[in-house]
Amino acid sequence: MSGTGISAAQLDSIEQAADWFSLFASGEACPGDRDAWQRWLEASPHNVWAWRQAERLQQRLQGMPGDFSGRVFGLAREDRRHSRRTVLKGLLLALGTGALGLGGYREFEQGALFADYRSGIGERLPVTLADGSQLLLNTQSALDVRYAGGQCRVTLRRGEVLLNATPGARLSVATAQGVVRAEGGRFAVRQLDAATQVQVFSGQVQVQPEHSLAATALEQGRACLFDAGRILSTRVLDYAADAWSRGLLIANDQRLADFLADLGRYRPGLLRCDPQVADLRLSGTFELDDPEQIFRALASALPVRVERRTRFWITVMPAG
């Protein structure tokens, strides 16, 4: 990340270390969790570095006067989500003098690191709201939830969320480009680099770009793309648009390069497509939780082979 002195890989490891630290501090870890943590630790030198930062933070806090350390890490037994945010803030502040600086720390605090709910790579995270509405975070997504004036306001910081609102529930989703409002219904909102995508599976939503004075109604079976100024496009909803919520990736005469770009969102590391096979067409239904089966299916259905430099660096090449 530019200007911070911390790489994207290190930042990812810091996030994961905070997750592990809050789990162990909560007392809820089981032997299987310990084994999984050990595998995580051995997977990358960045993970070892991040875990050492967490251990140093704990040592510093334990050396402070009074019961400060006990109050900080005691939060884990009450609310792991609260504890994770506390650990992250402590880690970033501890690194701040040399790596982040105050400006960098503030940037991270406003980003996905400190979101109320956050899904990892390949994870689909369900959340139940106070009114019974259901949220499902797609891979690498983060959001905040606030209640005010009889309305739930979701702030989507990163990624994609599928919302299944109870009838009559007043729900809004804020993104970097504007707000999507609904009363009941089922719809998805995805934060892209410079735009927001909205898909309506049932009911109706109101889409209001940040700099627009009026909202636009989007009906069931429609999708749209908007930026801060206007609605950029509308179209008929793809029939498999919510397949990810069922753990599926569906291709319908799709370019191989585009399919691999979609698949890459659900697995760690680098997934590349050789330009020589990028325009091959693919159809089929694939299980996101079984990427090895997907690679086998590709090699069987298309004239390609899967080359693994490491398990985190995979390239789909021409066969032969």
Image: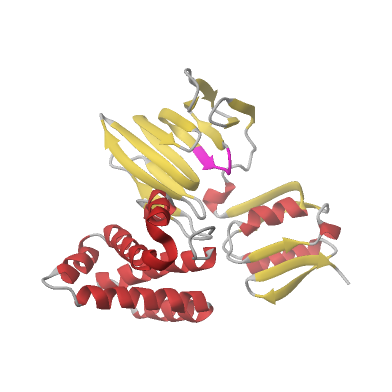
Q: Is residue 197 above or below residue 113?
A: above
Residue 82 appears at what percent x and percent y?
A: 27, 58
Taking the spot 13% from the left edge, 73% from the top edge, the residue there is 65
Quadrant for residue 56, please give it.
bottom left
Question: Of 179 and 166, which appears nearest the observer?
Answer: 179
Residue sticking out furthest to the top: 214
Quadrant for residue 242, please give it.
top right
Q: Is residue 148 left or right of residue 7?
A: left
Quadrant for residue 300, please give it.
bottom right
Taking the spot 48% from the left edge, 20% from the top edge, the residue there is 215
Q: Is residue 252 above or below residue 167?
A: below
The answer to whether residue 213 is magenta is no
Residue sticking out furthest to the right: 320
Residue 134 appears at what percent x and percent y?
A: 39, 43
Total numbered badges shown on the rendered structure: 0
Taking the spot 44% from the left edge, 40% from the top edge, the residue there is 163
Question: Of 289 and 43, which appears nearest the observer?
Answer: 43
Q: Colour mode?
A: secondary structure
Give the magenta part as a residue range: 188-194
Residue 92 appears at what percent x and percent y?
A: 37, 63
Residue 19 makes an appearance in the image: no
Residue 105 makes an appearance in the image: yes
Taking the spot 22% from the left edge, 68% from the top edge, the residue there is 73
Q: Is residue 307 left or right of residue 319?
A: left
Q: Is residue 254 above or below residue 305?
A: above
The C terminus sits in image quarter: bottom right
Q: Is residue 169 above or below residue 160?
A: above
Residue 183 appears at what percent x and percent y?
A: 39, 27
